[in-house]
Image (spheres, grey):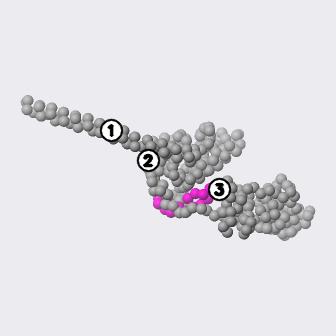
């Protein structure tokens, strides 16, 4: 847990999983979430479990019986009001006694229709990342760069893992053949345009639906499958996820090539159709000649 408090209303928030630089408070203020600088010395004068006062040499709280933690190496949570160091599981500051009661972060966004079942998807957060989740089919809509953040978290988890344990991690998908899967194009919940289908990292077998302008749709368990694919090492190197800008460039290139593809298809059809008509005419003439020459 990593706490910050609003300087105006003193509302607390847990920002341990956030990568933003500021967050909006419920009172309308903007809170800087830079890591807090701890006070030079913490005098442990209160119980971190119940907030009761304790003696300078007390080993346990006389009120609730909890052990008193004084080892500086175990005091990792910084009080957002007095900057004293507290144990990470403290419910009260061991110096000033304020309670640690972080409020849920305000979630920006609005309900969107699910691309699969059309149910309304409420906005929510996963590790501080804003998403829309369908409570019916359990799919996830990752707007903007949210997908990149989710994948980056999975990559970081693999990089931070113990190398001795990586060999036992198995991908949840083993490069399955997307060609044998049923093709179903889905519409973007923001613009209602058809999204592009692509095989994540070209070999994962996880088919994700992407709108270049608005975000990425993940069916139930696809994020877990992608994480398993990366954690297994099957993604190869480099492990940097494709950025939103790279996806936009690919989409622009595909859009520019689409008219040419259509023209080629039309020409092939016309030529094939023309050849078929010519064969039909020749066959009719031959049939007529055969009839009158009998």
Which quarter of the rendering shows the N terminus? Answer: bottom right
Q: Which residue is mark 2?
A: 183
Which quarter of the rendering shows the C terminus? Answer: top left
Asked whether the residues under the numbered discs 2 and 1 touch, taking CB atoms below 8 Å apart as contact, a structural biologist would say no
Q: Residues within 10 Å of mark 1 (few under 14, many from 20)?
A: few
Q: Which residue is mark 1?
A: 267
Q: CA distance from mark 1 to mark 3?
A: 52 Å
Q: Position of residue 240 (x, y in %)?
A: 62, 42
Q: Residues within 10 Å of mark 2 (few under 14, many from 20)?
A: few
Q: Residues within 10 Å of mark 3 (few under 14, many from 20)?
A: some
Residue in the image at 23% along x and 37% along y: 277
Q: Report the side of 40 relative to 220 (left or right).
A: right
Q: Is residue 115 magenta?
A: yes
Q: Earlier in the sequence, mark 2 or mark 1?
A: 2
Quarter-of-image position of residue 87: bottom right
Q: Position of residue 177 (x, y in %)?
A: 48, 41
Q: Report the side of 76 relative to 254 (left or right).
A: right
Numbered disc in front, either 2 or 1: 1
Secondary structure beneath label 2: loop
Q: Is residue 131 magenta?
A: yes
Asked whether the residues under the numbered discs 1 and 3 touch, taking CB atoms below 8 Å apart as contact, a structural biologist would say no
Residue in the image at 87% along x and 65% along y: 45
Secondary structure beneath label 3: loop
Report the span colored magenta: 114-132
Q: Earlier in the sequence, mark 1 or mark 3?
A: 3
Quarter-of-image position of residue 79: bottom right
Q: Nearer the viewer, residue 3 or 164?
A: 3
Q: Which residue is mark 3?
A: 127
Residue found at the far top of this picture: 293
Numbered disc in front, either 2 or 3: 3
């Amino acid at each position: 847990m990593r706490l910050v408090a609003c300087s105006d209303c003193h509302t607390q928030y847990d920002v341990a999983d956030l990568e933003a630089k500021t967050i909006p408070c419920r009172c309308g203020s903007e809170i800087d979430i830079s890591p807090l600088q701890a006070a030079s010395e913490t005098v442990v004068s209160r119980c971190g479990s119940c907030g009761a006062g304790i003696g300078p040499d007390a080993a346990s709280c006389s009120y609730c019986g909890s052990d008193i933690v004084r080892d500086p190496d175990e005091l990792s949570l910084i009080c957002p009001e007095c900057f004293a160091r507290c144990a990470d599981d403290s419910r009260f500051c061991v110096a000033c006694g304020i309670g640690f009661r972080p409020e849920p972060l305000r979630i920006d966004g609005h309900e969107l229709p699910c691309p699969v079942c059309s149910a309304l998807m409420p906005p929510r957060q996963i590790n501080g990342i804003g998403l829309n989740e369908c409570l019916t089919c359990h799919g996830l809509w990752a707007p903007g760069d949210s997908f990149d953040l989710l994948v980056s978290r999975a990559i970081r988890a693999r990089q931070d893992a113990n190398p001795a344990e990586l060999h036992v991690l198995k991908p949840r998908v083993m490069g399955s053949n997307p060609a044998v899967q049923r093709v179903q194009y889905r519409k973007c919940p923001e613009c209602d345009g058809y999204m592009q289908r692509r095989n994540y990292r070209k070999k994962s077998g996880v088919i994700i639906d992407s709108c270049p302008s608005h975000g990425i749709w993940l069916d139930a368990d696809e994020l877990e499958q992608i994480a398993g694919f990366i954690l297994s090492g099957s993604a190869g190197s480099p492990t940097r996820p494709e950025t939103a800008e790279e996806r936009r460039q690919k989409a622009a290139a595909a859009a520019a090539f689409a008219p040419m593809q259509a023209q080629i298809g039309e020409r092939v059809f016309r030529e094939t159709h023309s050849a078929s008509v010519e064969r039909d005419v020749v066959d009719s003439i031959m049939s007529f000649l055969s009839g009158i020459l009998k």
